[in-house]
Every structure is written in C-alpha cells, then in structure tokens.
Image (cartoon, rainbow, N blue to C red):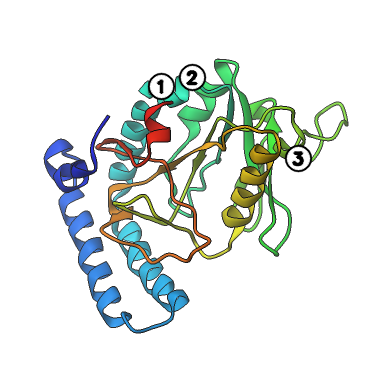
C-alpha cells in the first residue's frame, strides 16, 4: 500500500493532463484561505476551505477526472479491504457534484455477490439511510442534483432493507468528501448527512459487538490538501484512495 508520502510525489507517480497545475492551484488557494481565516470560527474556516477546494474541482478537466476515477477504481478493486468485504456501503456518484465515479466499483460489487447498501436522503434535516440495492436497474434519478437512489420498496412491494435493521453491519463504507487531508481528516459539503449516518453505523456496530465499518474515502488529486478544518464530531477515514494509490491511516485498515 502507498504511504502518506505518496501525496507529495503524486506529480511523479501519475501523468494525467493538468495534474500539477490543478493540485498546486488548489493547495495555494487553501493556504491563502487558511491564512485569511486563521482567527475565524471553525465553521467559517470550513466554508473557506470548501470554497478553495470547489474552485480546484471546477478547474479540473473532464478527461483528467475520468482518468483519475479509473485509476481510483483499479486501486480499490485490487485492495484486500474490497475483495474481503461482504457487506459494502457505497455511494452512487453525482456528476454535478464532481464526485469520484463509483460506477465500476458498484458493478463489480454487485457482480461478485456482495450485499450493497447505498445512501438515500430522507429529509432536509441531515437524515440519510443506507438501503439495500438488489439491482442496478432499481436506481432512479432524484432531484435536485439527479443523484441515483433506489426506491423505498423492492419491485415486490416489500420495504427495502435498511442497513441498520440488517443482521450484519457493514464491513466497509466507501464515502465521498469535498476534501481530505494527509492525516485522514474529511471535509464534507456542510449538510451533515454523513455525520449523522456514521454516528448511527458506529452505534449499530457497538450494539452488535462488532467492529465499526472500515471508512474509505475516495478523492481526486485536487481534493487532497495538507490540512482541513475539523470539529470534534468529525470522523476520520481509515483509508484514502487517490489516483496515486491507497493510503492507510490506521492499524484497522492494515488488517483488512
């Protein structure tokens, strides 16, 4: 597996078009935002960081995004944590939000017989479920961003299984983020949906006497910065996968 130092060598490890310019521009913008907001409240610091990272994402060429998504998918598919998992939580990427494409991962997981759960937003109060996905054809586009989600029931009319009601907790959760840093901290988009969902998943695993799921972040090169602002409730990822490789932060990840 790749060490954290790989982030500092990313320009030499992969030769995607425009990578150096995108990564340097994002890190420079982040440094400027952090300097300007060093005395501000945590939420203001987060907003500044989000603004800088979004700017980097918007400048990222489509062909580079596709190339990095393909490389990330290859790294995940080759990782023991993926091949050894049976119950997998995985997000369905949103092109409008410029998230790392998970199509190949979802197809592979379904084809190999893994039990997959995907996010479904419940309301505007930051509540989100992870529902069982029985077939890719079950996914439907949901406004306003066109994110693909399964309906609340199966084709038979039976309620779709929520991971919190299933007999076995998740082994692995692949999750997006707006930004990540070299310590495994994750910066979301500010909705709080994953914060709440992760709390419930951790509690569920504890209730069952099981280990919590391995948290795996997927990120484009421009989304990885030296430091992102965090609050005490923010959860770190155990693993971060970029186009450069798999970066582990915890002993837990090394054992999967």
Q: Are marks 1 and 3 in contact (CB under 8 Å)?
A: no
Snapshot quadrant of residue 218: top left
What residue did someone put label 2 on? 84
Disc with the residue nearer the chain's start (1 vs 3): 1
Residue 145 visible to the viewer: no
Snapshot quadrant of residue 159: top right
Describe the element under mark 2 as helix, strand or loop.
loop
Describe the element under mark 1 as helix, strand or loop.
helix
Within 10 Å of disc 1 (Cα), the crowding (few <14, some 14-19, many 20+) is: few
What residue did someone put label 3 on? 151
Q: Left or right: where does residue 67 sit relative to residue 212?
A: left
Task: Residue 193: give x, y in percent of width and height.
Answer: 61, 56
Residue at 18 percent of width and 37 percent of height: 14
Task: Residue 113: give x, y in percent of width and height.
Answer: 60, 16
Q: Nearer the viewer, residue 185 or 56?
A: 185
Question: In the rendered image of this protein, does residue 142 appear above or below residue 56?
Answer: above
Question: In the rendered image of this protein, does residue 187 appear above or below residue 249?
Answer: below
Q: Left or right: where does residue 19 sit relative to residue 192?
A: left
């Amino acid at each position: 597996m790749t060490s954290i130092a790989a982030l500092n060598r990313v320009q030499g490890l992969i030769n995607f078009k425009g990578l150096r310019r995108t990564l340097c521009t994002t890190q420079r913008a982040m440094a400027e935002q952090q300097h300007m907001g060093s005395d501000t409240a945590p939420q203001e610091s987060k907003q500044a960081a989000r603004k800088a990272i979004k700017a980097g994402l918007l400048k990222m060429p489509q062909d580079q995004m596709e190339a990095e998504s393909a490389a990330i998918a290859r790294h995940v598919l080759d990782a023991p944590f993926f091949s050894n998992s049976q119950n997998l939580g995985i997000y369905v990427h949103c092109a409008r939000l410029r998230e790392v494409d998970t199509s190949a991962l979802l197809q592979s997981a379904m084809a190999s017989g893994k039990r997959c759960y995907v996010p479904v937003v419940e309301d505007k109060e930051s509540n989100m479920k992870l529902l069982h996905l029985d077939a890719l054809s079950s996914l439907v586009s949901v406004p306003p961003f066109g994110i693909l989600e399964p309906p609340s029931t199966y084709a038979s009319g039976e309620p779709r299984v929520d991971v919190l009601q299933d007999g076995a907790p998740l082994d692995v959760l692949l999750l997006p983020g707006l930004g990540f840093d070299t310590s495994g901290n994750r910066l979301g988009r500010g909705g709080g949906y994953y914060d709440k969902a992760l709390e419930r998943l951790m509690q569920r695993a504890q209730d069952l006497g099981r280990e919590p799921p391995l948290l795996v972040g997927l990120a484009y090169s421009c989304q990885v910065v030296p430091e992102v602002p965090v609050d005490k409730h923010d959860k770190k990822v155990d693993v971060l996968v970029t186009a450069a490789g798999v970066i582990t932060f915890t002993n837990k990840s090394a054992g999967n």
